[in-house]
């Protein structure tokens, strides 16, 4: 009789879901070091054995869109089941420094960055100094030059700087073109051409959010599709739910038909009808709000809890502090038609779940637990738990296995051509990275609100590279096993 295999750690008796092979059954998982060594019905022995029967064991969730790149921000995401959180829409500049500083400080989960196009423009046109990407983006939101069109000389400087960042390990190019809608379509096409030449994706906040011509959400989406078709680049559309606004059917139809012709366009969405950004965003100008179907009172100033009373107050705040974080309701979740719009954006074929997590407001250093006076958008702490608690358990519009795929394998595959390390993530297989979440499908949920930062419930364990970051639903404050995820061009 053969002796059972022995491992550093054994997770026994869970319902194991591997979205690549289609495995969905009770298994024992053995882990040695940072990798999975066995997925089997056979008995395993280990230095540590944890009984996780009655729970789901899945690949750790992979967030393609997280601006919450601090230790505390990523701990909150770990409590939501996330093992890899990447800053791809805004990106970083310089990426080499962003990676080095994160590694030196330590991170609880895996991290990575794209090359930030908006940050490159801020640096070259307004003299922005390097720093934490969201902080720089907020600080220079009101700077005079970075939104404007540029000539051939400055365009060449932008492209050279972006290529330098990609060759320093960036995972692609982040394109916040919606914040600089007058920047020029020729530049967007040139950046897409650069991405195609380098074989990396772009991650785009589309140019327009509106249902009114000209400059509709559909027009913004068609620009992304055209760039992909015209250059051969892989173009990723960020938060298709909010940027499509109430045109999701037209946008989704265009993307689906383009995919049918072999055009590389991928999508993501988060399960909320409210969004978050800086108050100085171009699309939140008082005279443009009606194009989003919004009024000033749809906007909440996070730091103070103020609901913006009218257009005059909005203009005043945009002038005083254009980088202030706000929440805004782009639809009304209590309205059945609006709620249906949100659900259709989340259910669109092969749309990954991505949080668009934003930084904490009022946080003083990396302290735990988060104090009552600290605020952020609830998606920053509960995007994935809400997906499983709401879309899977309450509404039944996604199967558990499909939700796992959209949170794990799908984002991994979006990045695999540009980031070889992603081929070992998003799977529960022998040889895969031991980035694992164990959760209770009957209780997983997010109690977070716009006024209270509350960690998700139902996530029992989370391992990053075989190390417990969450154990028995408690964050492990002495564990910082997160590793950088680099692009393939890293020199």
Image (spheres, rainbow, N blue to C red):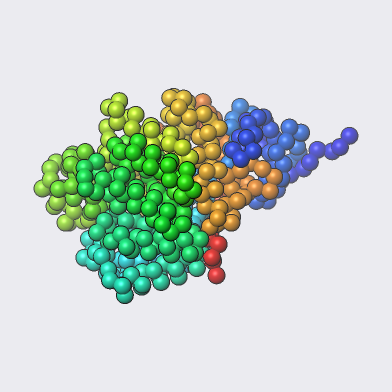
Left or right: where does residue 231 sit relative to residue 340? right
- Count the marks: how many? 0
Decide if residue 342 is in sight here. yes
Image point (70%, 35%), residue name: 28
Q: Residue at x 73, y 32 (%)?
A: 41
What residue lies at 54% left-to-right and 66% top-to-bottom? Answer: 490
Residue at (23, 53) in percent of width and height = 282
Can you see residue 91? no
Q: Is residue 412 left or right of residue 7?
A: left
Question: From this viewpoint, which residue is outermost toward the bottom?
Answer: 153
Quarter-of-image position of residue 7: top right
Rendered location of residue 224, percent (x, y): 37, 52
Residue 386 image position (x, y, % from top left) = 43, 34
Residue 478: image location, x then y, percent: 54, 51
Q: Position of residue 208 (x, y in %)?
A: 27, 49
Q: Which quarter of the image is occupied by the C terminus?
A: bottom right
**Is residue 5 or residue 244 the one in the foreground?**
244
Asked whether 331 or 8 is in front, the reply is 331
């Amino acid at each position: 009789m053969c002796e059972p295999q022995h491992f550093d750690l054994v997770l026994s008796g869970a319902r194991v879901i591997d979205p690549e092979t289609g495995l969905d059954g009770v298994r024992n998982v053995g882990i040695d070091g940072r990798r999975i060594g066995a997925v089997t019905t056979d008995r395993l022995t280990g230095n540590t054995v944890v009984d996780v029967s009655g729970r789901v064991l899945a690949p750790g969730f992979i967030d393609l869109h997280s601006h919450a790149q601090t230790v505390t921000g990523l701990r909150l995401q770990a409590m939501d089941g996330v093992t890899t959180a990447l800053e791809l829409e805004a990106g970083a500049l310089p990426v080499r420094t962003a990676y080095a500083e994160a590694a030196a400080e330590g991170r609880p989960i895996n991290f990575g960055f794209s090359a930030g196009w908006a940050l490159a423009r801020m640096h070259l046109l307004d003299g922005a100094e390097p720093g934490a990407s969201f902080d720089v983006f907020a600080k220079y939101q009101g700077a005079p030059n970075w939104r404007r069109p540029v000539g051939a000389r400055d365009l060449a400087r932008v492209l050279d700087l972006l290529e330098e960042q990609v060759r320093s390990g960036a995972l692609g190019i982040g394109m916040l073109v919606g914040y600089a809608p007058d920047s020029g379509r020729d530049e967007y096409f040139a950046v897409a051409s650069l991405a195609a030449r380098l074989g990396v994706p772009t991650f785009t906040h589309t140019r327009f959010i509106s249902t009114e011509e000209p400059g509709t959400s559909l027009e913004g989406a068609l620009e992304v599709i055209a760039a992909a078709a015209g250059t051969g680049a892989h173009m990723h559309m960020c938060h298709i739910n909010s940027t499509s606004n109430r045109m999701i059917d037209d946008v989704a139809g265009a993307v689906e038909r383009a995919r049918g012709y072999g055009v590389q366009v991928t999508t993501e969405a988060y399960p909320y009808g409210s969004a978050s950004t800086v108050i100085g965003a171009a699309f939140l100008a008082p005279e443009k709000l009606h194009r989003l179907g919004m009024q000033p009172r749809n906007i909440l100033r996070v730091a103070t809890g103020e609901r913006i009373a009218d257009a005059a107050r909005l203009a005043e705040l945009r002038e005083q502090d254009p980088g202030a974080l706000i929440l805004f309701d782009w639809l009304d979740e209590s309205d059945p038609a609006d709620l249906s719009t949100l659900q259709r954006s989340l259910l669109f074929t092969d749309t990954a779940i991505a949080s668009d997590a934003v930084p904490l407001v009022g946080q003083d250093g990396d302290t735990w637990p988060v104090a009552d006076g600290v605020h952020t958008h609830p998606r920053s702490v509960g995007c994935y738990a809400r997906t499983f608690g709401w879309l899977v358990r309450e509404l039944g519009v996604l199967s558990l296995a499909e939700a796992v795929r959209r949170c794990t394998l799908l984002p991994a595959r979006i990045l695999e051509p540009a980031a070889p390390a992603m081929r070992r993530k998003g799977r529960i297989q022998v040889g895969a990275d031991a980035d694992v979440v164990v959760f209770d499908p009957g209780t997983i949920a997010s109690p977070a609100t716009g006024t209270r930062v509350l960690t998700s419930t139902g996530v029992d364990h989370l391992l990053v590279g075989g190390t417990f970051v969450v154990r028995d639903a408690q964050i492990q404050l002495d564990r910082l096993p997160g590793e950088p995820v680099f692009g393939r061009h890293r020199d």
